[in-house]
Amino acid sequence: MSEKKYWDEKIETLPRADLEELQRRELKDILTFAYSNSAYYKEAFNAAGLTPADFNQLEDIQKFPFTNKATQRERQAKGGLLGDMIAVSEDDVVFVSASSGSTGVPTLSPFTKQDFDEWQDVESRLFYGAGMRKHDRYVHALNFSLFVGGPDVIGAQNLGALCIWAGTVPSERLLFILKEFQPTIIWTTPSYALYLGETALKMGIDPAKDLAIRTIIVAGEPGGSIGTTRETIEKVWNAELYDFFGLSDIFGACAGMCEAKDGLHIAEDHILVEVLDVKTGAPLPDGERGELVYTTLRKKARPLIRFRTGDIGSVNREPCSCGRTHARIKIHGRLDDMFIVSGVNIFPSDIEFVIRGTSGITGEYLIRLYEQNHSVKYRLEIEKSDDNNEPDDLLKERVAAALKTRLGVKPGDVTILNDGDLERATHKAKRLIDERTLIYEI
Ligand SMILES: [Zn+2]
């Protein structure tokens, strides 16, 4: 028998109209469930003058109130470990992940057994879409301590791959695992994939030749969806890169690339996606950039209704060449990281696209925002490659011109550093330093 093309063909290729009807029914059920079982949702819907009876068509979701990270934090403080957004008894919760917010108070994300098992089935689906099969050896190099990405390894195991629970170990240790076990797939962050590749080369290991990795899954930063960054990582490792996207509030990964690599298929039987105008909250047409807002359709422990993520991206509901019908999302960056120079909205990912695609530099960078004559400016620190003999002035000009072409605005300055001067990230890279003293509104 030939190998199946999809993990779950029926659901992944459901005709669009049937998928939306499924979402409509699930949404009606989850609104009813949340209203009946969560003190928070009862209060929030009542305050908006709504009950689940007001929901009939998918568009009706637009009447319902938003939630966000602050809602979670406030309601978690309402008592018990999990607060009053929870919609089941704590006895039915089998797992919590936690993410540390800016206040340092971790917000918890609870799962019932069914939530957990369904989550892992989505992970199997996404791994399968990224080409993982039973014969693969898979290294899970994500943090296992409270982090929602940790348990995703179970999805790979349920798929039948041989799984190595590496966690976040020192690079030398991870490279030892890669050498000894010769795994074929690894999941890490894009920054770390580059750092690990550099470290390997310094240790005399060529990742493209001496290791068996043929697929790299990345998440946690936009890099995997920035063409030039993806190509750089693929070249270092001689591997295919697949970008995944997850949210501690929902699943370790909610969306992942297929072989077409044109956006990330989001599990629409579990998550409803809205793209909204940041200022007005009005829905935007497919393809336009706005804030991504998610509603969980099946999670019982803590349903999330209209959760504003602070991520800026777009959605594409056109059928994909892979045959899957679930929408593809593209995430451009965090709203918090966006800055405006001379009226142009700029995300660090726009700058990364240019830096990773420019020759003679290492691809590492740091952006500093500052003010000059009451307007916002940005300057860049980049590293010249060891083998580049080009004078610094010419290199500066070349980089500034490439940025001007792509973004429309030049950097205020470019500082040329030596290879290795910028700190390498072992998890999420800090690439933006805000030195502005005034407060800006978007
Ligand atoms: Zn596809």
Image (spheres, grey):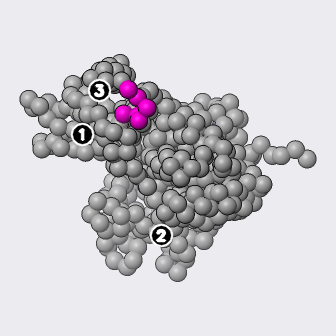
- In the figure, residue 85 lies in which quadrant? bottom left
Lower sequence index among marks 2 and 3: 2
Decide: is 65 above or below 106.
Answer: above
Residue on which the image places disc 1: 368
Visible residue check, residue 338: no
Q: Amino acid at mark 3?
A: Asp
Q: Is residue 328 above or below residue 177?
A: above
Sequence-wise, the earlier of marks 3 and 1 is 1
Q: Which residue is mark 3?
A: 392
Query: In the displayed structure, does residue 436 sit left or right of residue 416?
Result: left
Residue type at mark 1 is: Arg
Q: Position of residue 68 (x, y in %)?
A: 35, 54
Residue 33 on image: x %, y %: 51, 63
Q: Which residues are magenta?
A: 384-389
* Neighbour tally class for label 1: few under 14, some 14-19, many 20 plus, Cα within 10 Å: some
Q: Which one is nearer the viewer's eye here, 120 or 212? A: 212
- Give the CA separation, mark 2 to mark 1: 32 Å
Judged by depth in the image, the label closer to the viewer, 2 or 1, is 1
Prevailing secondary structure class for the magenta stretch in the rendered image: loop
Write the residue at 60% across / 30% down: 318
Q: Which mark is residue 249?
A: none
**Does 213 appear in magenta?**
no
Residue ID at (52%, 36%): 232
Quadrant containing the C terminus is: top left
Label 2: element kind: loop
Element marked by disc 1: strand
The disc label shown at residue 145, or none? 2
